[in-house]
Amino acid sequence: MRLLVSVATAADARAAIEGGADIVDAKDPGAGALGAVTLDRLREICDAVAGARPLTAALGEAEDEGTVERDARAYAEAGAGLVKIGLLGTTDVFRAESLVAAAGRGVAGRACGVVAVAYADAATRALSPLTVIEVAARVGARGVLIDTMDKHGPGLLGVMSAGDLTQWVSAGRAAGLLVAVAGQLTARDLAGIAEAGADVAGVRGAACVGGRGGRVSADLVRGLVTGLAAPAYAAPR
């Protein structure tokens, strides 16, 4: 399993790489669970990464097809290898398919793929996590991510049982998708996420001095890398 660290600045990106992160993810933590950095900031982060790690980027929550396609194209051109599109507020399957497909059109012909994001704590405001897998597979997305919408509430392992998480990961892998897991994960959570079969575990707050809104620390990232080898954590049921 690979460790993804979300970064807000070029300095964050350099610290994430120094600490041993496998993937650098550009995100604005002050703009929600999937806040997008500006294109200028993404370019700064891309320059700092300088090809040393894969670079992904959050696009925010999908609003309309035209905006999604435009933003996906711009972020791919700026250097993102994967773009993550949120579906919060979209409860219609056909609408979700249209939005994810628009992101796919935006990155077409570029070395970039689309990741559709599901939320484990947004039952009335978004499609179910299993439905997001179905949507992603039908429209040719590269992967799926499960996350938490509320960054002040319980983490993923507080709102989703170990069994449900394993089922979700297995469904994503069976659909041929890259499967990523995030949501206020800590070092002691990581072995359990790996045991569930995820390809990628994503963190932000656990890698930062001062929490989610702070700065990435190379030392904290090293601790998370060490956590990958820790005994599995049994999530609450």
Image: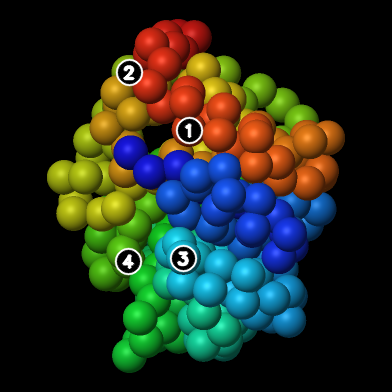
**Closer to the N terminus: mark 2 or mark 3?**
3
Q: How far is the residue under mark 1 from the one under mark 3? A: 17 Å
Residue 110 position (above or below residue 139): below
Q: Which mark is residue 52?
A: 3
Instruction: Give whichever of 74, 42 is nearer the camera.
Output: 42
At label 1, counting other C-alpha atoms closer than 10 Å, the crowd grade (few under 14, some 14-19, many 20 or more) is some
Percent x, y of residue 235: 46, 13
Identify the secondary structure beneath mark 4.
loop
Q: Earlier in the sequence, mark 1 or mark 3?
A: 3
Q: CA distance from mark 4 to mark 3?
A: 24 Å
Q: Quadrant of residue 161?
A: top left
Disc with the residue nearer the chain's start (4 vs 3): 3
Relative to 160, 49 lies left or right: right
Q: Which residue is mark 2?
A: 163
In the picture of the structure, the residue carrying the numbered disc 4 is: 141
Query: Mark 2 or 3, which is nearer the eye?
Result: 3
- Quadrant of the rendering where the C terminus is positioned: top left
Q: Residue at x 66, y 23 (%)?
A: 154
